[in-house]
Amino acid sequence: MHELIARQFRLDGKVALVTGGSKGLGKAMARALAAAGADLVITARHRETLERTAEEIRSETGRKVSVIVADLSRRDESKRLAAEATERAGRVDILINNAGTNVPQPIHEITDETWDEIVELNLSSAMALSRALAPQMMERRWGRIVHVSSIMGFVSAPGRDVYSATKSALLGLTRAMAIDLGPYGITVNCIAPGPFLTDLPMSLLSKEQQEQFARRTALGRWGRPDELMGTVLLLASEAGAYITGTAIVVDGGWLAK
Ligand SMILES: NC(=O)c1ccc[n+]([C@@H]2O[C@H](COP(=O)([O-])OP(=O)(O)OC[C@H]3O[C@@H](n4cnc5c(N)ncnc54)[C@H](OP(=O)(O)O)[C@@H]3O)[C@@H](O)[C@H]2O)c1
């Protein structure tokens, strides 16, 4: 690749915090950021998986990778994570709000506990981490914030009430945050993935539903987590410096059909 273009995607000297960075889409995005030169802080609830992933990324890229265990369905944990990540790595320049989950319940069966937990994890933790980390990015007049939404933020499916509510809300939060933070050189965007082969959809969908999802894409197949690498690098680097307040849908053409 010509040096001029390669340089645009480099992240040397930057630190990225990736929530849900232990596996699935978060792990793939964390690997991409480290491969481009960023040091990392990755976080999730289970230490063993985090440590394994951190070691893999360290040996693959030679970057520093710190691990912090946190349950982001609790507000105090999001606050602690922001403080601890900054202390451990010295700074956070790139925030990837990826941790999320889906507990399908139709509207007449939603429990308060599920609603509150999913809203906190999928939506409020993205606000709490952005609120805590934006001031240091504002001071340095450079920052990148990426929220992970979903095609279920644009459309929905049976029982996806709380999931779609949170994933749509991230699109609105992205627009407002981009306006707030633009004057400080900080971009804020969403990635909206379609069907990607990770534990999350696999644990929720029957074999038949999995095949239906694949057929519905224009490409006729599920996405591989590493197919998000290019998108996250674009949004996290100088290459995407003029992209803000928007969503990039990475869905193999699912929404187009
Ligand atoms: N896969 C898809 O097809 C797809 C499509 C659209 C959007 N997405 C979105 O992409 C994001 C990542 O999903 P994925 O498919 O990669 O799922 P995944 O493989 O299940 O990974 C989820 C990650 O989030 C962490 N996590 C879960 N609950 C957490 C909590 N309460 N506190 C802190 N961390 C937590 C998990 O680690 P621990 O379990 O150790 O906490 C793991 O690292 C989610 O926001 C999801 O909604 C996925």
Image: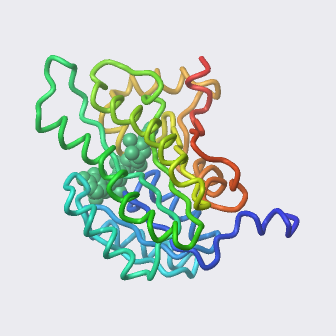
| Residue 36 x/y as whole percent | 64, 69
Kindly identify the residue that appears in the image at 64 percent across and 28 percent down. Answer: 219
Q: Quadrant of residue 65?
A: bottom left
Q: Is residue 23 above or below residue 174?
A: below
Q: In which quarter of the image is the N terminus?
A: bottom right
Q: Which colour scheme is used?
A: rainbow
Residue 36 visible within the image: yes
Kindly identify the residue that appears in the image at 65 percent across and 52 percent down. Answer: 230
Could you say which is closer to the camera, residue 48 or residue 88? 88
Q: In which quarter of the image is residue 74?
A: bottom left
Kindly identify the residue that appears in the image at 49 percent across and 81 percent down. Answer: 64
Left or right: 212, with 116 as reference point: right
Q: In this view, does 254 lie above or below 115?
A: above
| Residue 4 x/y as whole percent | 85, 66
Left or right: 136, with 45 as reference point: right
Q: In which quarter of the image is the C terminus?
A: top right
Q: Quadrant of residue 144?
A: bottom right
| Residue 29 x/y as whole percent | 52, 58
Kindly identify the residue that appears in the image at 36 percent across and 81 percent down. Answer: 87
